[in-house]
Image: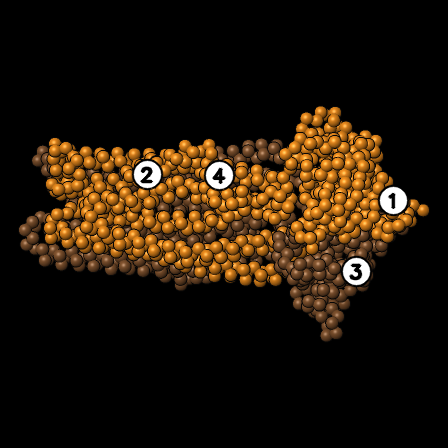
Amino acid sequence: MEQEKKRKGILRYAQYVKGYWLPTVLTPFFMIFEVALEVLIPLLMAAIVDGGLYARDDFLLRGILPESLKTGSTGLILTLGGLMVVAALLSLTCGVMGARTGSIAAMGFAKNLRRAIFEKIQSFSFANTDRFSTSSLIVRSTTDVTMIQNIFMQFIRIFVRAPMMMIFAAIMAFRINSELSWIFVVAIPFLAAAMITLVSLGHPRFTAMLKKTDAMNTSVQENLIAMRVVKAFVREDYEKRKFHASVEDLKKAQIRAQKLFSFSGPIQMFIMFTCTVILLALGGMKIIHYKSFGPGELTSLMTYTTQIISSLAMVSFMIVSVSMAKASVGRINEVLDEEIDIIGADSDLKVENGDIEFRGVDFSYVNDPENLTLSDISFKIRSGETIGIVGGTGEGKSTLVQLIPRFYDVLAGEVLIAGHNVKEYSLYELREGVSMVLQKNMLFSGSIKENLRWGNADATDEEIAEACRMACAEDFILGFPDGYDTDLGQGGCNVSGGQKQRLCIARALLKKPKILILDDSTSAVDTATDEKIRKAFREYIPGTTKLIIAQRIASIMDSDRIIVMDEGRVVDIGTHDELMARSEIYREVYDSQMESSEGGEE
Amino acid sequence: MARQSDMIAKFKGKRRPDNFFKTIGRLLSYYKNCKWEFIIAVLFIIIYSVSVIVAGYQLKGLTVVLEQALEDRAGIHMDSQIAAYTSILIYMGVLYFVSVITNYALNRLMLQCTAVVMAKLRVDLFDRMQELPVSFFDSKTHGELMSYFTNDVDAIREMLNQSITQLMISTVSLIGVVVAMVRLSAPLFLIVLVLGTLVVLITKFIASRSGKNYVKQQKALSKVNGFIEEMMEGQRVVKAFNHEEKVMLDFDERNEELRQVATRASMLATIMGPIMNNLSHIFYALTTTIGVLFGINGELIRKLSENSRFDWQKIGVEGAVLIAFLGFIRQFSNRVSEISQQFNFVLLALAGAERVFSLMDMDPEVDEGTVTLETKEDGSKFWTYIDKEGRTVEVPLVGRIELHDVDFSYDGKKLVLEDVNVYAKKGQKIAFVGSTGAGKTTIINLVNRFYDVVDGEITYDGIDIRDIKKDDLRGTLGMVLQDTHLFTGTVMENIRYGKLDATDEDCIAAAKIANAHYFISHLPEGYQTMLYSDGANLSQGQRQLIAIARAAVAAPVVLILDEATSSIDTRTEKLIESGMDKLMEGRTVFVIAHRLSTVRNSNAIMVLEHGRIIERGDHDDLIRQQGKYYQLYTGAFELS
């Protein structure tokens, strides 16, 4: 599959044209017509000047025009003039139509591409996401897409237009005078070579410049975000010096890169002017010596020179922008090609009960057996049990529970739910069965009710109220003027930390899961409420397995069993009393939190 | 540079015509950093434009010679014709050569200028931003702040890079082209004038619409951005709740909206090229037709002259004139549309420049402090100032901080702190406890003068902190803030941020105090491990440990810990505690903590509610009082 993708290369992007094929195909046609008409105009001009003004009998197009239109007659002039205006008008129409269809095609393409990227990101596992950062994924799905969309549009417009212009203009020039037109055959490769040299020399320099710009912006952003730190440590001058250095750096890179491009205009001009002068010299001599060549023809040849040279320049600039977009394509391909490392099984298996078993589980965030976050974890939990997990920060508690809904996959060993390896379930069914209240709680913009419905889209008001009662959230929700319809800002910033945690618990309860995992999710809730919530769990969802990670030992003291973790290992499992008796770590944690509160209760 | 603080009020993101020239003027004033390059570049622009036009004008002379040659069928004067033709052609070639050389030179010079000007502009902007008060940063989102450096500065860069040079060339050329055309044939120029008017009108019409649509497109784009960002941040939740499909539907809606707006915006932007291009073709065709029709020896002129007394020959167009004239039509329409299009970019960029300048004009943090911190030979430090009688007063640096009847308000209306009195002696640990918004962090913001008191005063070793030089005041305060911010660089560099001349050993010792040494030595490259994007490769707790080490290396007199251990679990906190105790020893310490176990051993605990201190005393006192603190402590009350 990987091979196949690589082979397809740029062609893979063809699939994103879907739905916009008609404008995509029409655009080049419009461009070709526009160019063809545009190239016709100098030809007509030559005819009208030589035939009308100078009344030369051998003017261009004499052959195709009817005899009745006599050379030098007003009729001939009006006919040719009329043709010119019509050609220009048609060319205008084609040009406008091309711009229109081109825009439709390119924006449609961008839409499809954006969708594909977002869809892919959605399917990412956390291991996938960890490889990118959020901001880089956003850049990829917006800025990079815009870049490619512009290239796409240029491709169907300018990339058709410019070479066509060159070809048509060259054909016309040869038709007018093949002897003189040989000059283009000499000039084009010369200009092309010059442009290619500039582009290939310039590209790495430009990339270097862009990198410097990025680095500078990153450091500015860091500085702005950390302004309080800067001020607190009186590091303004230090930061200024740092910034001045990177500005100086950027300045040098900028001059280095753009210096080359200062040549491109003059080179173009030089070649164009040289062609013009040579054409005038040779053409003029022809007229003076042999009188066989009209001034109108000479003028139109000069126009074709301009057309040919400027289209060639256009093509070379296109190559620049395409090569600039290469980085964007690469970044997007990275996303699209990212191997999703967690794919659910294709099965209808449902989570039947809340049994959990870990069998010799090793886990590493970097897939390195030498760098294990969890090692050799084994335990069994029966459906309906309440299990507390304690241990220090970074000892692997959160990591452990994230293996249950397959947010990550084990490195070795297996995780079983209701007797089946988690890999045997489809991701949908597995996660339907497991509800998780995360350490980093997140509510979305929208009302409280909308947020709660994440748990169950079809929940009735009564069900919602019931879940909120269990999570001790009903009272404060009803205290808001809009009750359940209260709007939460982005990130749920309109509620306090404790309230947010309770809403998240209610949301998880609405799913009616077989397994409920609370990852340090009552830390901001007061102890009394915390206890009430746990009591509600015991009473209302006795069949649900509850895994509770908590900093506060009081939150887990009354669990059926407690897992003690240290340095990525399960060091002990037992009831509070058992652990008090035999686990030093547990006692340490307990003492650190409890000694004084006992003192306070004297 | 003139400070025009009163301009800020006027700007407010809007563009006013009277600021237009001011802004341009101010922007141009930056060119004084590359005065000579700029002057020479302008000179070259004139030489370049004139030589191109004069060269084009030679077509007339050339065609006249050719016309003579065509009439001279026998070729009697051929030699003189060739001589005349060749000399004009050589003249033309020389002019073209001059134009190529000057074009290169002016581009190169302008590039130099732009780079210099941009660098200066960035430096000025950044430097001023460093000096602005914290209140400015609090009133703006990070996105808004960044947009000065990205959107606004970029717009200016684009303008300076392309528009300015282009605009100057176009303007000079346009004047030249018009002069040349009028000299060639005033009647034909009248036709072209219609073209010019049309071009200006159409450009204006499309540009104004295109501008509006562009804004709409940016809005739709940022909506999509925001949506992706929210969903990315909530990815765990999305997955945990099997919400992928629903999210996709929501995305589609926004995506389609963006497509529609973007299509319109793009259409308006791309349509300009073909319209301008073909418009000039139409006029080319019209001018050719009319010119030929009124050809001086043409059928029409002859007939007209026969039938009227008016000498139609007078307005007849000569062939040579027409051919030279046609050469200028395209130039004319290109120049006009360039100017009108560039002008639009210039307007956009000037709006950015106005924003940048208005920021540069903002008042920096006030620092009228005269009391400075000096170090004696024996290493001891003291405050020094000159009193009213002109005597030098020296006050030893101790770290005694007192708040007397302090009132404070962020907006001038609602009091956030009221009648706050706090006395902290050297070596004491003072804790603040209370809900979010009770004013804990505000007190600290006042002590380090991120904000200034509204009423009352804060003294440091008996000196009003407003009289102390800000840098010296903050230099004695060590802070570990609620949000840990680290910088791109190695772990070592991040710790050294606290004291720039600290040795590696100092930094490692500080890390040991903060109990960060253990985990740092287990990082892939130990102290040389690079941290990226605010230390994203570390856990929240680890980042906080580094921040504590950073404060420790600074060896401050007064230590401020604002929720410094909130992300560290109690057991680790316990481990740090011994180090922290060492760190706090002999210093005045202010602690803000959510977790009460952290503040228990403080000398005094202040319970804040709605900006007032409602309870104070040490842990045992407060437990005995059985008030708010007691409730909190026993878990009967929840801090929000």
The residue drawn where x is 26% and y is 54% is A186
| Amino acid type, residue under disc 4 in the picture | Ala
Q: Do labels 1 and 2 share a chain?
A: yes
Q: Nearer the viewer, residue B560 or B187?
A: B560
Q: Are marks 1 and 4 on the same chain?
A: yes
Using the numbered discs, state the Cα–Cα distance from disc 1 to disc 2 in whole angstroms: 82 Å
The residue drawn where x is 45% and y is 38% is A14
Would you name the residue on which mark 4 appears? Answer: A110
Q: Colour of chain B?
A: brown
- For disc 1, the chain is A
Using the numbered discs, state the Cα–Cα distance from disc 2 to disc 3 in whole angstroms: 77 Å
SS at circle 1 = helix
SS at circle 2 = helix
- For disc 3, the chain is B
Q: Nearer the viewer, residue A333 or B387?
A: A333
Q: Colour of chain A?
A: orange
- In this image, A243 relative to B207: left or right? right
- For disc 2, the chain is A
